[in-house]
Image (cartoon, grey):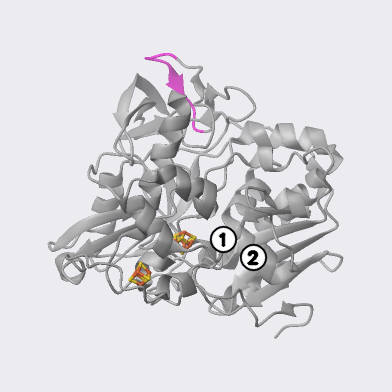
Amino acid sequence: MPAGLLHIAKTFARGIRPPAHKESTRALPIRRLPFAPELVVPLQQHTGSPSVPCVKVGQEVVRGEPIAKANGFMSVPMHAPVTGVVASIELRPTSRGEMQPAIVIHTYMGASQEVLYSAPQDVDAMTPNELVAAVRETGVVGLGGAAFPTHVKLVVPEGRRIDTVLVNGCECEPYLTTDHRVMLECADDIHAGIQIVQKAVGATRAIIATEDNKLDAVKSLNESRKKASTTVISVLKPQYPQGAEKLLIKALLDREVPSGGSPADVGVAVLNVATLAQLGEILPRRQGLIERVITITGPGVEHPGNYMVALGTPLSFALKHAGLKPDAVQVIFGGPMTGHSVADLDIPITKGITGILVLTGAETAKRPTKIYPCIKCGYCIDACPIQLNPSRLGVLAQRGLYEAMESEFYLNDCFECGCCTYVCPSHIPLVQEFRIAKAMNRQRKTAQ
Ligand code: SF4
Ligand code: SF4
């Protein structure tokens, strides 16, 4: 182990160890996908209020130019992912199936697509408040899948103090290797991003957490560390869902985020490595977030790999480039544990999409089709990393007692990792039932 690393073999209790399936893409360098003739930029790619368009139909836009403004603090601006012309602002389907307003841009295929829309700024001279404002202008959100506006995470709640920035590079979701490649290829940007975040929140140290199946990335991160860096790299045993922020905080710092609380309650800011790499690269140039790295993989893909993709690229265009095998039958945004199936291949790739997994009929045929009654084996309880009682929650869900699930059995603490569903011998779709229960509770509260 190189000097300066903090090696921690222990991990969190419980969880599961599903097959990693990362071998087909983890050694493949990031390649740029060509620009599609039409890009669709939904106005809500993040948690919070949708952005508000600041361009008109027929207007020419330059790659990187702001095209939508943030709408309130819990919102971010959008930037043109290509040089082209705004063809329409209209409702378009998204990955969750609903229609959402989107800015449709027709790409100038002959344009160089160089990002000219930038103005360098000295981030070292900025105050924490100026950094938060500057991060907001980039439109950066959590690229690990949550799409939570990053600038909001950088505002320390009143009465709290952040001492540690925890950088999440675990990437425990099977099949996905984007974070692995970003750590390997963009280590300098990650360290630059860490310094920005440390200064914004006032943290005295940073810990990069990853798993011991990414030691080449650890080496790259360690080599690019500056001598005076207060950043250490912690290497954990692979386990799912290691990347869940509450589990990481417990494993590395032995601090427990209270039920319903946030990492700031225990003095920690958690950010994903890809988010920090983007911040470290684009903030000093005063650019916007216009692209991201995704893994396109699975048995149904001809050319699996890690691709730099312009935001708004249609899924069908990305899949055409990566090549779909004739027996491909299912497309999933994200990985097999937390991802979701998509029905429409015209939906765009947005800020929170980490990967595209394509399965063939051979894999989907292995799935159980029959659900049996609960046999009270307790496997789900043993697997739940936050010690909920999925079996009991499942019984209440089947009876429609959604309120009791929340008030008595901590439904809202469930972060939908899917461990309980994975181990259930009766094939009860527990996590799906919990999602429905949460949605029903939200609906009830809205109605009230
Ligand atoms: S109850 Fe929720 S947190 Fe616990 S294993 Fe199931 S999905 Fe994961
Ligand atoms: S794993 Fe499935 S069968 Fe076993 S207790 Fe949990 S819900 Fe019941």
Observer-nearest residue: 154 or 413?
413
Circles 2 and 1 in contact, beta carbons < 8 Å: yes
Q: Which residues are magenta?
A: 56-63
Q: Residues within 10 Å of mark 1 (few under 14, many from 20)?
A: some
Reply yes or no: does residue 244 show up in magenta.
Answer: no
Residue at the image position 49 percent from the left and 27 percent from the top: 62
Q: Which quarter of the figure is the N terminus placed in? A: bottom right
Residue type of the residue flagged with mark 1: Ala
Say the numbered circle drawn on residue 391.
none
Residue 194 position, x and y percent, is 73, 54
Residue 113 position, x and y percent, is 46, 37
In this view, 198 is above or below 128: below
Residue at the image position 41 percent from the left and 31 percent from the top: 42
Q: Secondary structure at mark 2?
A: helix
Task: Judge whether residue 84 can be spotted in this image.
Answer: yes
Q: Which residue is mark 2?
A: 248
Left or right, residue 229 beside residue 146: right
Observer-nearest residue: 402 or 145?
402
Q: Secondary structure at mark 1?
A: loop
Say the numbered circle drawn on residue 244.
1
